[in-house]
Image (cartoon, rainbow, N blue to C red):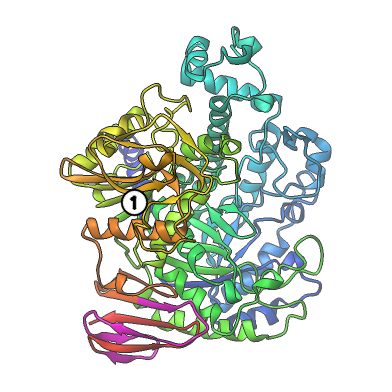
Amino acid sequence: MRKYFILFLLLPMMQAVIAQQAGVHQLLYGVAYYDEYMPYDRLDKDVQMMKEAGINVVRIAESTWSTVEPQDGVYDFSHIDRVLNAMDKAGIKVIVGTPTYAVPTWLVKKYPDVLAITPQGQNQYGPRQNMDISNKNYRFYAERVIRKIMEHVKDHPAIIGYQVDNETKAYNTAGPEVQKLFVEYMKAKFGSLESINKAFGLDYWSNRINSWADFPSMDGSINASQNAEFAKFQRKLVTDFLSWQAAIVNEYKKPGQFVTQNFDFEWRGFSFGIQPEVDHFAAAKALDIAGVDIYHPTQDALTGTEISFGGDVTRSMKSGKNYLVIETEAQGFAEWVPYPGQLRLQAFSHLASGANMVEYWHWHSIHNSVETYWKGLLSHDFEPNPTYDEAKTIGKDFQKLSPQLVNLKITNNVAILFSNEALSGFNQFKFGWGSKVGYNDILRGMYDALYRMNVGVDFVDPSCTNIEDYKLLVVPALYAAPDSLLERLNLFVKNGGHIVYTFKSGFSDQNVKVRTSRQPGIISEACGITYSQFTVPQNVSLKGDPFQVGSENNKLNTWMELITPTTAKVLAYYDHPVWGKYAAITQNSFGKGSATYIGCITSSIVMEKILAGEVKNAGLWGDDQKLYFPIITKKGVNEQGKTVHYFFNYSSAPADVSYTFKSGRELLLNKAVNKNSMVALEPWGISIIEEQ
């Protein structure tokens, strides 16, 4: 008995060791593959073409529940088995997805309540992601199909990992049962209605709640605090759902296998900003490896910004751990078909941000339904094409350079502090800005400026314990934040850190209740400013063009705060007959550090000038900053302890780059490169140099 008791005590430690061992030990180059979608049997031919392209991993099964379980309790694993066996024979590894993000017809027929009820009414069958992820009937059948698949495949040697669900969100589920769950959540968090009424200011318009039985639906709420809290609750539904699925899969997975998820971002026709519907950092805790899909403009609009942004966020989800690009475009939309060289440029750009896998959605173009014109690596004819031919060169180079490029460790001194709570709160009042400017517009404006200057960036959120490790924090629109976070940021500056805030930071507490002190509230101490009024600029510029950007780029738009410095130095005043006495941008020395405050929306060029000054002020301006977009450079340390430098030319014109680092070897060409020599980059070209 004592022996079993000791084993019981050691089990959590053993599981932790197994989880640590789960990872990726070679560069993975892959595609999503759906044997179920094929118009005719060509599995052997596809495998042959994959091998020729250097494909060494495929992702399967995440969207085909109705094929796996065509009727209630009737299972057909033939497509999964066919692919697993064929890939194993060919030496291609497999990631198996749980198929729960698209429900079968029989489940909806049997339990119509699995379809989410949103503020617009109940969803209809047809689209994916139309279900209520908290629904008990959905959960029962989702767990059953996950377990059936895992029981069937768990011993297959081709499998290296599992993906739980796909691009998971709460899908705006807000029906009566969800509202009941929200009430229980509020009881647990706030304890009493009086606490809620006070924190949310519910006396306004008679919104006060005097009985738990009277707790209203959030669908009609006009209270920003309620709406932001409900959004936070919906994000928690996602975190809990993914943790639940990961726990099921962990019961079956083998040592060395991983569990991941395919996270996505705010969508604006491509991956754009922080996902409002998911707390990525919280949800990623249940995973061994973070996974992501990253889509972006291409052809003349290809900049690499979205690749870098998505990679930096995903790497930061697991505190710098390498990640998987589970989906990215091969041909994609018609406007995304890449120019020659761009597929290679994109693939290596993912690696430079810390990706260990680049996987295309998808292998083959689909001949039916809504995504018919989202083309895969192969077109509808399944024949080789220029994109496929270029992919073959990538696969060859991934295989050759895997020892030098896998598990690249990236260290940065600059971080962007983002907040889902601030995002929800800020976006509640977009109508108040008089425009459609949202949180992600502000964040991306700052990120993009740093990207163009080749300043490496991590992302941190209020839950992170390592904020103090950075020398410079960039803080966009921290609209909603608890006192403790703002005091922590003040201390960060006092101890020698540097911060750049934008307007509306520190404005409200964690419950989106505006602070009663002069703004910007608690951070006034570090920023050395106050203001009590704000307005929309009408023909307002920065006085004297302080950043030397020219009259057109010196104009302001959308928002301006009328700032009075207390101890801060003024970097820019407003140029206006009435508002000219107020500061627009300030910088304050506080303790051993400094805090810069941007009280208005500037042009992108002015933002870049401000951030360049802050990078220099933090002592972080180096050789990388001698280069500027369209030349992008990134670096990291490989498993041999050597620094690897990537140089990318995001341009249709050739370019020469001065290599100012230690002598090394150009890995793609296997050629020695001396310090201070010139490196030639072709249009849309790449150079990878490992220091010796």
On the image, the x and y values in percent for residue 157 come to 52, 66
Could you say which is closer to the camera, residue 155 or residue 503? 503
Residue 268 seen from this side: yes
* 325 relative position to 483: left or right: right
Question: Which residue, as the protein is rendered here, is positioned at the far right?
Answer: 109
- Please, what secondary structure does the residue beneath circle 1 have? helix
Q: Splitting the image into 4 quarters, where does residue 628 fall?
A: bottom left
Picture residue at 43% right of the left edge, 61% below the top:
605
Quadrant of the image for the N terminus? top left
* 470 relative position to 335: left or right: left
On whether residue 671 falls in the magenta region, the answer is yes
On the image, the x and y values in percent for residue 316 come to 39, 53
Span highlighted in magenta in the image: 646-673
Question: Which residue, as the protein is rendered here, is positioned at the far left?
Answer: 592
Question: Which residue, as the protein is rendered here, is positioned at the far top?
Answer: 210
Q: Splitting the image into 4 quarters, where does residue 527 fall?
A: top left
The kind of residue on which mark 1 rests is Val
Q: Which residue is mark 1?
A: 17
Could you say which is closer to the camera, residue 199 or residue 664? 199
Picture residue at 65% right of the left edge, 56% below the top:
62
On the image, the x and y values in percent for residue 685 come to 46, 83
Residue 106 position (above or below residue 86): above
Residue 390 position (above or below residue 497): below
Residue 475 seen from this side: no
Q: Splitting the image into 4 quarters, where does residue 137 fall?
A: top right
Count every numbered label the image shows and give the total.
1
Quadrant of the image for the C terminus? bottom left
On the image, the x and y values in percent for residue 269 come to 65, 59
